[in-house]
Each structure stands twice: as structure tokens, then as C-alpha cells.
Amino acid sequence: MSLGYAEKLSYIEDVGNVGMTEIFDPPRILQEKIERLTMMIRKSKHLVVFTGAGISTSCGIPDFRGPTGIWTLQRGGNALPEASLPFHRAMPSMTHMALVELERAGILKFVISQNIDGLHLRSGIPREKLSELHGNSFMERCSCCGMEYFRDFEVESVGLKETSRRCSNADCDVKLKDTVLDWEDALPFEEMNPAEAHCEKADVVLCLGTSLQITPACNLPLKCLRGGGKVVIVNLQKTPKDKKASLVIHGFVDKVIGGIMELLNLRIRPFVRVDLLQTIFTQALSSDERYVNWTLRLASVHDKRAVLPFITSVEVSFLGNHTMKEAVLDKHPFNLKRRTVLTAEPFDVILKVNLSEGCGCAYTRIKIPIDFHASADDMKRDKDHVFRKLKSKAVKGSYCGQNSVVERSVMMMGPSPSPKTEMTVRAIVTNIRWYDEKMVKTAGAGSLTTNANGYAPTLKRRIQGKNENGTPRKHLKGLIRHKTVKLDME
């Protein structure tokens, strides 16, 4: 089902010249085509969307064959563009969020993506309505039970290799694997089968931002033709499938989709990103039982050894206890150690959590009450409810940084002040982005008008190894493939 690595490089050489020049329909023609496509969508009973790298260029992720695409630059011997933001902070484009609204309205039945940036899942497309053909840079999967884990960091390997983390299912406890395909890997049947089934059933397959040149994925949209379905292509370059399409639109995908949403009278809701962290408080009596030795640690909910990619440092201060010195934790792991007299009155630890580049605010504050003699109970809130409240508050207030407790677990070794460990998971709003037809506005970043009609600054990607031609394998992987979900983080 898949080409070998060398064959793919050869194939790219054969078809790489197709469609490198950008084409723009004249404004009047473009509007007419948008209206025609809108009518097709209105009449559709089973709309399927097939996406490629072009829907993520406005997120700062480069495509392949555009003027500043990965392969275009490499073919010309030019350096890849400098990144301005971390890859893990990429936010969905207008197109990503419009697809979410179309799905919620019952219009869009299924999404097939060749991308590995995780933005369809992050935007809110249900996992059961999404095939990520080439994997997902932020996903790990258990090969035993099939559980999937959507991370807030880029998984360190490619090629379906084992990672350092294990499945949380007690019946498995096997090492997880990354989900991103390498060149020689076949497309997974669990992604291909539903993609094929929905394309065969579709009356419209809408191809967005894809050159339709990588097999076997590029042939999926054509499967609707046998049943009388229609293929529509929205792309800035010509594709080998243009002659098979009922409608070809040359224009920015965000502009086209924005026009469709306006004609359908569907509002694109803001994207609000919520990240999770956990605080781990541990206390134990000193040997002479006069002091309490305690530690406070900020850790990832995904793995205690994993970094918190959205946090740069933590400033610690105290309320109610003037004897303790303030501290700055500026490297992972964020770990504070203190010794306090057993008779100390309750006090609060104030954490000023400084957020990383790409977040919508500079910091958030967390207050942690400390009482060595008090006991605490386990607590678990409905995570979806907590997220909804945080997102609503963030949108109404137009700012980030709100946080809330999601759950707390306590392990006591006896009555207080016996040894105790208290782990608390907190949700934090780290980004907001608003969308309309002409402008994309991000909290803390002003108005990003280029996002609706052009290219955004490039995002930083980790480069891992190179192939024999000097091409960064991680970059090619990161922009040619996509995959699966335990939602530890939004």
C-alpha cells in the first residue's frame, strides 16, 4: 500500500514540478466559485473533507510545494525558514475551526488528513470522525489495547517506535509507540479503512490545501466518483487530479472557507487552548519530630519525567509565613524543598508560573494552601465541565491565564502530620484565538491579518537526523504525515 523510501524520493522528483507556481483566481471568479461550492455543501448529504499541508500554512507550518515550501526551498538549495514559535504551540487556522462548526452542524461527516500537526484534534474534531493517515506528532498509542495518548509535547521518535512511556492500563503496562509513519511504513488499516468507506459513500469530497501527489492517499477522494459523488479541490497550485474535479478553486483556503461560512451563516467560535499540569506536595516529619520536611513539584500530567513545554520558570512566594525566603525555579524539574517547624501556622504558597513563547499571556498565578495538621480528601471534577467554564470565562474576559483544579488525590500514611502526598491536577487557559472572514486575532498577539489571507511566521520544529540527501527527516515527517486518544490535554 505504501511506496518504499527510495521510491518515494524518486516519485517526488517525478511529480515535484507539478503545481509549484501559485495561481489565484480573479476576485469575481473566486466569489462565484465560493458561491457554487456553498450550494454544493448545502445540498450535500455526506460531505467528506480531505486536508493537506496547505490548511496549516496560516498556523506557521510550511507546506511542501508552495514558494516557501519545504521541498521548494530544498530543491533550490535554500535554507529552511527560521522558526519564530515552538511547533507545540501551533494553533488551529480559520479552516480548522470552520470544519469543527460544520461537523457540529451535522454537515461534515468525516475528515481525512495527511498532516501530522495534531491541529484537527486540537481544534475539536471528534476522533471517531477523523482519519490521520500519516500519524500525529503529539500522539502515542498502545499496541496492546489500542489506547491513544494526546500529548502537549512532540513525541521524540518517528516510525512507530517505542517511546519511554508505558500504557496506563494495568492489564497492558507495555511501552507506548509513536504514531508517525516513516517513508517505508504502510498506511495503517485503522485509518485507511474508514477513510475509504467514507469516500465511497460521499456525494462531495472537498480537498483543501493538498497537491494530491502522494500515493496512495491522493487517490482516496476519487473513490466518490463511482457512486456519483463530486470532487472539489481548493489549492494554490495545479494538481494531477484537477481534471477529475467538478470544481477547482485557486485561492487561500482560509479565504475560501471563510466565505463559505459567511454564506452558510455559521459563526466560527474562538479557539481556546487549555493545558494541564500537576502539583505534587509531599511532607514528612524530621527524625526528631520537630520539623516537617516538605517538597512541592510542578510536573507533567503525561509523565512525571516529561518536561512542561509551556512553562519557562516558576517564582515562589509565601503568604502567612514571613520566615521563608522566596525562590525562583528556572529549570526542569520545577522542584521546591523546604523545612518548616511543626508548630507553624497554616500558610499559602503562591506560584507565579511564567508561560513560554507562543502562549497568550505571560504568566498565571496558583495559590496552594499548606496545613501540616489538616487532612484532605480526594476530589475529582468533570473535566469537560471544568474546561467549558474556563473557556467561557476566557472568551468573555478576552484574556488567558485562568486556572482551576480538575482533580486531587491524597495518600496518607497515618493521622496528620504523618507523611502525606497530595497530587493536584490543574487546568490553565494558555491561548485564545478569534476568527472572522478578514482577520484572526490572538490573545496577547494583536491582530494577525496574514493568517486569513497568507502565511504566518514559521513554527520551530525539532530536527532529528537527515537522509542521504541532507534533507531533515524530521521536517519531512512533520509536514507529510498524520495519527490517534486519551485526551490528557486540550
Image: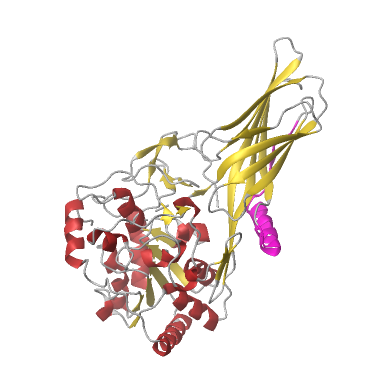
Q: Is residue 288 visible?
A: yes
Vertically, is 43 above or below 132?
A: below
Give coordinates of residue 266: x percent, y percent: 57, 77
Quarter of the N terminus within the rendering: bottom left
Picture colour scheme = secondary structure
Give coordinates of residue 413: x percent, y percent: 69, 21
Q: Residue at x 26, y 46 (%)?
A: 466
Q: Quadrant of residue 82?
A: bottom left
**Tally of marks:** 0
Is 280 or 318 nearer to us in this picture?
A: 318
Give coordinates of residue 45: x percent, y percent: 45, 78
Q: Residue at x 56, y 40 (%)?
A: 301
Q: Quadrant of residue 375?
A: top right
Q: Residue at x 70, y 10 (%)?
A: 287
Q: Residue at x 53, y 77 (%)?
A: 437
Residue 254 on the magenta segment: no
Vertically, is 50 above or below 460?
A: below
Q: Is 1 situated left or right of 308 in this image?
A: left
Q: For the stretch drawn in magenta, what is the main secondary structure?
A: helix
Look at the image and give the residue range highlighted in magenta: 376-399
Residue 392 on the magenta segment: yes
